[in-house]
Image (spheres, grey):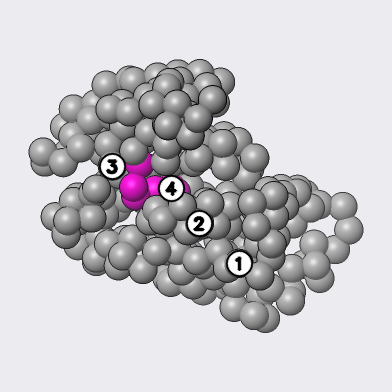
Amino acid sequence: MTSQDIHSEKQHHIDMQKGDVAPTVLIPGDPGRVELFASLMDEANKVAEKREYITYTGKKDGVPISCTSTGLGCPPTAIGVEELIRIGARNIIRIGTCGAIQPFLEPGHMIIATGAVRGEHTSEEFINMEYPAVADYRIVRALVDACEKLHLPYHLGIVRSHDAFYLESPWALGDYRKRLQPWVDMGVLALENESSAIFVISGMQGVRAGTILASGYSILEEHEEKIHEEENIRKMVSAAIEAAKLLHERGLAE
């Protein structure tokens, strides 16, 4: 099978082909957030559903935007990103939640990643660790402008992607705070499980990628206050949709 065949046929995992997705694709891990995306669009239709990969494509203010869930962690996300790129995705924006590790982060604050610590191992299959996992500056700019337009507080900085979800969490065996302190000291904002592979794969293939995350309280501290996670996620998805519109307006949707 030739490279041309790979790019023209229906993709095995996401079950889509060229023409099924817009140039800008939002990628949550949670399939339920694709339904939320659809509810915030002016129009949206389910294009495909296979395994953890559910896709809606629609329009907001006349701008075509797609959303594909990729599941939890870098291996399924890497598969989804590779296949989306093959069928025409040119802007990939991760939308998700995270484990905040800086005390100044509060629920409802948005985290816009400028880069990611490569604490996972999927991206090593593509290229060695000397290659950086950085977000595309044009997507970072669009996400910043979207948050400012929607009056959402945001923070720019590095996140840490890793594979062992429970190892760096309050549910971990052992002293997770001690384990995380070096990352806190270096100013890493949050923990998550996908961005570094997205940035590496997209960067290697000349595709723009970025990440916006809805923050909660720092996982290193105890809080009794209840956070309104669903509303914060809705705001985050709205910001990503607005950023997609800005990329279109700026001629970055091809």
Amino acid type of the residue tagged 4 in the rendering: Ile
Rounded to the nearest angstrom, the CA distance separating label 4 from label 1 is: 23 Å
Q: Nearer the viewer, residue 183 or 46?
A: 46
Q: Badge 3: few (under 14), some or many (20 or more) residues near its Cα, within 10 Å?
A: many
Rounded to the nearest angstrom, the CA distance separating label 4 from label 3 is: 16 Å
Q: Badge 4: few (under 14), some or many (20 or more) residues near its Cα, within 10 Å?
A: many
Q: Nearer the viewer, residue 12 or 34?
A: 12
Task: Say which label, 1 or 3, has the lower sequence index.
Answer: 3
Q: Which residue position holds label 4?
A: 95
**Disc number at residue 23?**
3
Query: At x 50% / y 40%, what residue is drawn?
Result: 82
The answer to whether mark 1 and mark 2 are in CB contact below 8 A is yes
Residue 214, visible in the rendered structure:
no
Element under label 1?
A: loop
Rounded to the nearest angstrom, the CA distance separating label 2 from label 4 is: 21 Å
- Frontmost of labels 4 and 3 is 3
**Disc number at residue 131?**
1
Q: Which residue position holds label 2?
A: 204
In this rendering, position of residue 140 left or right of residue 173: left
Amino acid type of the residue tagged 2 in the rendering: Met
